Image: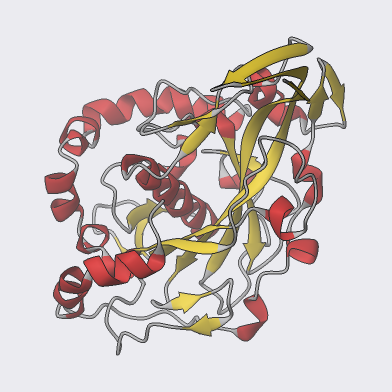
């Protein structure tokens, strides 16, 4: 897993290059102390449902996200082996709040900590601009911070389950040190597949993904699409938008996709026995909950149109956003045998 201290050491040159780039117009947001992460009050706890235990569903779900639970544990029993250890038990699946994502117009602002830890002297600021193509669309640029935040571990709950992460809170990525996030052109050099998927022809395929996202479904094979939120490529901080809240979600989702391309995403295996690397994300395994500037009333699948959930979520003068990322976990909860 990429650690913040390692990033700061290894990306010093990249930071220097980014800082000498021209400054962009800053927005009104400032780094506020009131955004410090509180897992008890900020997390929308009904997003952990439905929970499936031995094939029996517990709890309700939004009718529009019924399709997200297609990968829930259906077979009631399971058996696992890891090295010399063997266990059997009941298969369990649930949505786990494991990661947080900041989308920031104020660079260096660590919203989860409520502090500006990396002043950039007016550089790397977020911006919004109109697109002179006869449409009403605009373009937003923002930075992204990705945190490891295993809430169950932080609250010391359900730690006996073998599929609950045993890591502590950490900062996994800050895009201020990534020149590729500041420029889609540089990103294409590091990820040349972006040329293949970041074009109008591939964009036409995203129309189907957008329609599916509106119905609460996710088309996993279209990994380069984010429904109504745009495309994963280019992997940079620029995104076209009509709805600011929807654009925040798009950049949060794009940042999550980028973590997979960097080798920092894992996914629980269908048998519930282990975690495996996920260089290309499985979109149906993730959903987002807005925590700042206004706490969202529910979680949304990747690409869900903002018209269905973003109303009254953009507080005036606040252009920094924070999301909780819920991951679908499938776990074999059982008893070890000698």
**Number of numbered markers:** 0
Q: Where in the figure is residue 176, as x and y percent of width and height?
A: 31, 70
Query: In which quadrant of the rendered view does residue 311 lie?
Result: bottom right
As drawn, 101 above or below 84:
below
**Residue positioned 87% across, 32% down in the render:** 59
* Residue 51 visible in the picture: yes
* Residue 136 visible in the picture: no
Query: In which quadrant of the rendered view does residue 54 lie?
Result: top right
Of the pair 195 and 102, the residue shown nearer to us: 102
Q: Residue furthest bottom?
A: 121
Colour pattern of the rendering: secondary structure
Q: Where in the figure is residue 295, as x and y percent of width and height?
A: 71, 62
Relative horizontal placement of residue 166, taking residue 182 as reference (left or right): right
As drawn, 137 above or below 114:
above
As drawn, 43 above or below 162:
below
Q: Quadrant of the C terminus?
A: top right
Q: Where in the figure is residue 259, as x and y percent of width and height?
A: 39, 47
Q: Where in the figure is residue 269, as x and y percent of width and height?
A: 56, 23
**Residue positioned 60% across, 18% down in the render:** 81
Of the pair 39 and 207, the residue shown nearer to us: 39
**Residue positioned 31% across, 85% down in the render:** 120
Relative horizontal placement of residue 264, taking residue 192 as reference (left or right): right
Relative horizontal placement of residue 251, taking residue 8 as reference (left or right): right
As drawn, 111 above or below 203:
below
Of the pair 232 and 7, the residue shown nearer to us: 7
**Residue positioned 65% across, 32% down in the render:** 329
């Amino acid at each position: 897993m990429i650690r913040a201290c390692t990033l700061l050491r290894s990306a010093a040159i990249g930071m220097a290059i980014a800082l000498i780039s021209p400054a962009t117009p800053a927005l009104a947001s400032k780094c506020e102390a009131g955004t410090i992460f509180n897992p008890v009050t900020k997390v929308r706890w009904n997003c952990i449902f439905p929970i499936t235990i031995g094939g029996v569903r517990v709890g309700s779900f939004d009718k529009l996200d019924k399709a997200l639970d297609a990968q829930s544990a259906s077979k009631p029993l399971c058996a696992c082996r890891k090295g010399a250890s063997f266990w059997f038990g009941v298969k369990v699946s649930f949505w786990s709040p494991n990661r947080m994502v900041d989308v920031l117009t104020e660079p260096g602002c660590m919203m989860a900590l409520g502090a500006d830890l990396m002043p950039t002297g007016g550089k790397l600021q977020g911006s919004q601009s109109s697109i002179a193509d006869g449409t009403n669309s605009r373009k937003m640029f923002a930075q992204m911070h990705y945190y490891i935040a295993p809430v169950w571990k932080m609250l010391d709950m359900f730690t006996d389950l073998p599929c609950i992460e045993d890591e502590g809170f950490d900062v996994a990525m800050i895009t201020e040190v990534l020149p590729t996030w500041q420029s889609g052109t540089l990103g294409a050099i590091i990820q040349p597949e972006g040329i293949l998927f970041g074009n109008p022809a591939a964009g036409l395929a995203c129309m189907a993904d957008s329609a599916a996202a509106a119905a609460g479904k996710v088309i996993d094979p279209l990994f380069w699409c984010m429904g109504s939120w745009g495309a994963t490529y280019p992997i940079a901080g620029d995104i076209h938008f009509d709805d600011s809240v929807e654009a925040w979600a798009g950049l949060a989702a794009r940042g999550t996709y980028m973590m997979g391309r960097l080798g920092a995403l894992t996914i629980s295996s269908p048998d519930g026995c282990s975690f495996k690397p996920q260089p290309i994300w499985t979109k149906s395994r993730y959903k987002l909950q807005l925590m700042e500037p206004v706490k969202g009333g529910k979680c949304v699948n990747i690409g869900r149109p903002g018209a269905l959930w973003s109303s009254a979520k953009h507080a005036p003068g606040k252009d920094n956003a924070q999301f909780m990322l819920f991951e679908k976990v499938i776990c074999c909860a059982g008893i070890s045998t000698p």
